[in-house]
Image: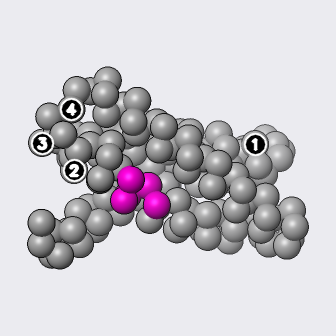
Amino acid sequence: MSGTRHLNQLFTYGALGLVGTASHYLVLYLLVEIAGLAILISSSAGFVTGAIINHELNRRFLFHRTQRSYGGSAVRFFLVAAAGFIVNLSVMYVLTIVFSTYYLVAQVAATGLVFLATFLVNKLWTFQA
């Protein structure tokens, strides 16, 4: 596969991911600011919301040519998401609790790290035939 195709897939993954990420941030913000829940709980709830949305968007629009069954890709996707969840929660903990970083700034850093890692694993393992 050419480098251009990889970059196009990364761009599409990012564009689709914006929908899930926006959902994640909306849930995070509402739970912290309106419901008064703890940042780590709110970020976790937002992450799960975004992961569900991202799976459907990626399956339908980016990796739709895969020969893997829906169930097969879903199990793999959510295993990758579980690893991403741990990374997200760890980064949020370190930045907000240890370093007292504003929670939305910390979430941007966590999102960037999770984005790159999950793209590679989803491309090479989750949706690969």
Q: Secondary structure at mark 4?
A: loop
* Residue 28 makes an appearance in the image: no
Q: Which mark is residue 65?
A: 3
- The x and y percentages for residue 55 are 37, 40
Q: CA distance from mark 2 to mark 1?
A: 30 Å
Find numbered disc 3 in the image and state the secondary structure of the residue it sits on: loop
Badge 4 amino acid: Arg
* Picture quarter with the N terminus: bottom left
Q: Residue under circle 4?
A: 68
The residue lying at 29 percent from left, 53 percent from top is 123
Report which residue position mark 1 lands on: 41
| C-alpha gap between disc 2 and disc 3 | 8 Å
Q: CA distance from mark 3 to mark 4?
A: 9 Å
| In front: label 1 or label 3 | 3
Query: Image check: 117 left or right of 64?
Result: right
- Which mark lies nearer to you, 4 or 1? 4
In the rendered image, the quadrant that contains the C terminus is top left
Q: Secondary structure at mark 1?
A: helix
* Residue type, numbered disc 3: Arg
| Label 2: element kind | helix
- The answer to whether one can see residue 81 in this image is yes
Reply above or below: 101 against 17.
below
Return the x and y of residue 102 as percentages of the image width and height: 78, 70
Residue 4: x and y in percent read 15, 75
- Residue at (52%, 68%) from the top-left corner? 112
Three-letter amino acid code at the position of disc 2? Leu
Label 4, residues with CA under 10 Å away: few <14, some 14-19, many ≥20? some
Which residue was labeled with disc 2? Answer: 62
CB within 8 Å, label 2 to label 1: no
Q: Is residue 45 above or below residue 24?
A: above
